[in-house]
Amino acid sequence: GISSGVLEWEAVPYGSCRTITVGVCNSSLPLTGHEWGSGHAIQLMNTGHFWRGLTSQSDGRNASFAFQVNDVLGFRLDMDAGILHISKNGAPILDASGLKGKGPLYPYANVNFG
């Protein structure tokens, strides 16, 4: 995880599953079960639902944020500015600010095959 600087990565969903949730989390997020809407993470679900639990920003759902198999999800976590940028297939879709001082933060993914 990082507390300062910038971390960039991509995720490309593949295969068959019910839900995929991606984003960033702190070390308090449980590694088992489903923690949707957790106060320990910024999460984007393949349905377009998003949660900004680490910030005071609102949660919600936006159909254009939904993603599927073979979409390329890009993440840029800038801890110096306190912002997470998420893109889908190269186009920006979601920003979450207010992360400065909340690290270390880690890349996060949860897959529900049920």
Image (tube, rainbow, N blue to C red):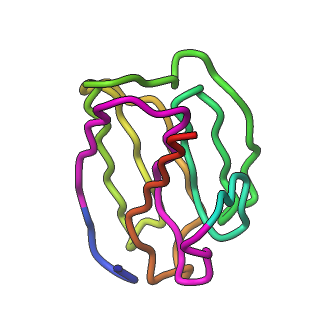
Left or right: where does residue 17 sit relative to residue 59? left
Question: Which quadrant is the C terminus positioned in?
Answer: top right
- Magenta span contains residue 24: yes
**Residue numbers of the magenta segment:** 8-32
Count of marks, rendered view: 0
Q: In what quadrant of the picture does the N terminus appear? A: bottom left
**Does 91 sit above or below residue 81?**
above
Position in image of residue 45 (x %, y %)? 56, 38
Outermost residue, top side: 63
Q: Give coordinates of residue 80: x percent, y percent.
A: 38, 73
Q: Is residue 101 left or right of residue 105?
A: right
As rendered, which of 52 and 71 lies closer to the eye?
71
Name the residue furthest front. 114
**Left or right: 86 with respect to 60?**
left
Residue shown at the point (40%, 46%) measured from the top left: 85
Give whichever of 76, 14 is nearer the camera.
Answer: 14
Would you identify the image quadrant in which residue 60 lies?
top right
Percent position (x, y) of residue 13? 31, 35
Q: Residue at x 51, y 31 (%)?
A: 46
Picture residue at 66% right of the left edge, 53% below the top = 52
Magenta includes 25?
yes
Q: Position of residue 8 (x, y in %)?
A: 23, 57
Q: Is residue 40 above or below residue 89?
A: below
Q: Is residue 57 above or below residue 48?
A: below
33 or 48, which lies in front? Answer: 33
| 105 left or right, relative to 33 | left
Residue at figure coordinates x 52%, y 74% from the top left: 100
Along the viewing direction, whichever of 29 and 33 lies nearer the viewer: 33
